[in-house]
Amino acid sequence: MARRTPGGWTTLALVAGVLSAPLVVFVAVFGVSFGWWTRFFALHQLTWGVAPWLFGLGTVCALVLLWRARRGGLFRVLAAVLAVAVVAVGAWLFHGSTRPYSSVDVAPRSVSTNPSEPPPFSTRLMAERSESGGAREQDLNDAACPGVASIPRQVLAEDATAALQRAGFTPLPSSLFRVEGTHTGLWFQIQHDATIRIRPGRTDVRVAVRENLVPDDQACRLLARIVAELQPRS
């Protein structure tokens, strides 16, 4: 068996440096899924604490790999291409998530199509939120989302339930005038609760993150998705 040269080991070390940041994020998500640590630790300590520094290290390693690739060799060229791809994807992801997951004090806990009179959550859903550490009704800070407005008509409860399902929510027991559901994110399994209040001539929607962590504008994206699904379908 051929012995790997020092240059080969150097290339592998540089590739490991490039992959270190994605690996830490993967481990953070994996650990939350299996209950090894809290979401707060995974988000603040690993994803937004350690990973950015490793991403900087990975960028330096990618530049070194590009410089080494000029000397030729298929392995070096492939390693350089892989490194550039990983850094480019990582930069795009970080650019799209410029504000880290943070305390609810720096972002709205809840968003609604009617922030001055937001639809209240049912007693049952508020009990579930309380059991999982969610904010109490009186502590929610409702805000509006740009470009998202109330539905100027009374929708049917079954249509509201179908809209929640299409938006990725799991429907909860509801009534004729209030439909609710919960959305569990793929990354870190962060949950958002939604309630739809149905009244004659108007339907309002509210979305609130369940835990004391706010994933940027995810609540607004979910609210906009629900409202879009509530529009008349041709």
Image (tube, rainbow, N blue to C red):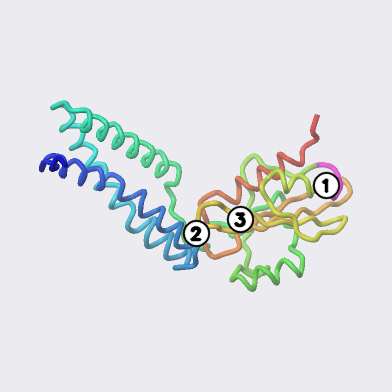
Q: Residues within 10 Å of mark 2 (few under 14, many from 20)?
A: few
Q: Which residue carries the number 1 mark?
A: 202
Q: Is residue 214 left or right of residue 231?
A: left
Residue located 34% across and 58% down the image: 49
Q: Which residue carries the number 2 mark?
A: 106
Q: Are marks 3 and 1 in contact (CB under 8 Å)?
A: no
The kind of residue tagged 2 is Val
The kind of residue tagged 3 is Thr
Inter-mark Cα distance, 3 to 1: 27 Å
> Can you say which quadrant of the picture contains the N terminus?
top left
In the image shown, does 12 or 105 lie closer to the viewer? 12
Q: Quadrant of residue 208?
A: bottom right
Is residue 153 inside the magenta stretch? yes
Q: Are marks 1 and 2 in contact (CB under 8 Å)?
A: no
Disc number lying in front (3 or 1): 3
Disc number lying in front (3 or 2): 3
- Read off the magenta span: 152-157
Q: Which residue carries the number 3 mark?
A: 184
Mark 3 or 1 closer to N-term? 3
